[in-house]
Image: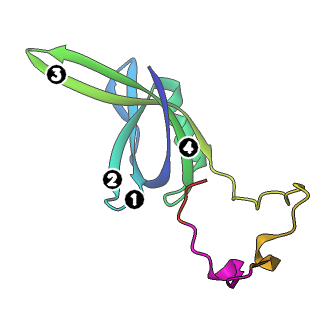
């Protein structure tokens, strides 16, 4: 199961050798929101070095797999990261070529009242 999430690199840890042939490196991603979340991921084997290209505080996209296993009647879940990319700065969207004048210059007149666009509070999501 492959998933992706965007957040800020909050903490990165050193590589840990679990055996002669297996190593992991953990890192924590901070997800913003009303209640910020600190989520721990792990990189394994040759992917441990991916994290060297990033600094704490960088905004990144992380692609990961959800892994689970049972050991001695206990259950473990790992977020196994396999790709990390730096988020590019947002660029403004290109100007609309809809043929309509910009809304802020638009004035609607009727026999009852004059309504300017800035006086209109539109709470519709579309």
Q: How crowded is mark 4: few (under 14 residues within 10 Å), some or many (20 or more)?
A: some
Q: Position of residue 30 (x, y in %)?
A: 40, 54
* Residue span colored magenta: 111-122
Front of the two marks 3 and 1: 1
Q: Distance between the residues labelled 2 and 4?
A: 15 Å
Q: Distance between the residues labelled 4 and 1?
A: 16 Å
The tag on residue 33 is 1
Badge 4 or badge 1: first in the primary sequence: 1
Give percent across and percent down for residue 44. Answer: 43, 27
Marks 2 and 1 sit apart, C-alpha to C-alpha, by 8 Å
Q: Where is residue 8 in the image (x, y as percent from the top left)?
A: 48, 55
Residue at image mark 4: 61
Q: Which of marks 4 and 1 is in front?
A: 1
Dot 4 or dot 3: first in sequence order is 4
* Viewer-side residue, 81 vs 49: 81
Image mark for residue 18: none
Judged from the image, the secondary structure of the residue bearing numbered disc 2 is strand
Camera-nearest residue between 78 and 104:
104
**Above or below for 46 versus 126:** above
How many C-alpha atoms fall within 10 Å of the one at disc 3: few (<14), some, or many (≥20)?
Answer: few
Please give the residue where the numbered disc 3 appears in the rendered image: 75
Residue under the point 69% across and 53% down: 88
Left or right of 100: which side holds 22? Answer: left
């Amino acid at each position: 199961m492959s998933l992706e999430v965007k957040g800020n690199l909050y903490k990165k840890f050193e590589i840990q050798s679990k055996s002669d042939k297996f190593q992991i490196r953990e890192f924590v991603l901070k997800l913003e929101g009303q209640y910020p979340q600190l989520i721990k991921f792990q990189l394994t084997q040759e992917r441990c070095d991916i994290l060297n290209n990033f600094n704490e505080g960088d905004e990144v996209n992380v692609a990961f797999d959800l892994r689970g296993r049972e050991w001695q009647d206990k259950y473990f879940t790992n977020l196994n990261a396999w790709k990390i990319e730096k988020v590019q700065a947002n660029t403004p969207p290109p100007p609309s070529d809809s043929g309509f004048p910009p809304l802020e210059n638009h004035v609607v007149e009727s026999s009852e009242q004059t309504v300017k666009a800035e006086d209109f509070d539109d709470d519709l999501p579309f």
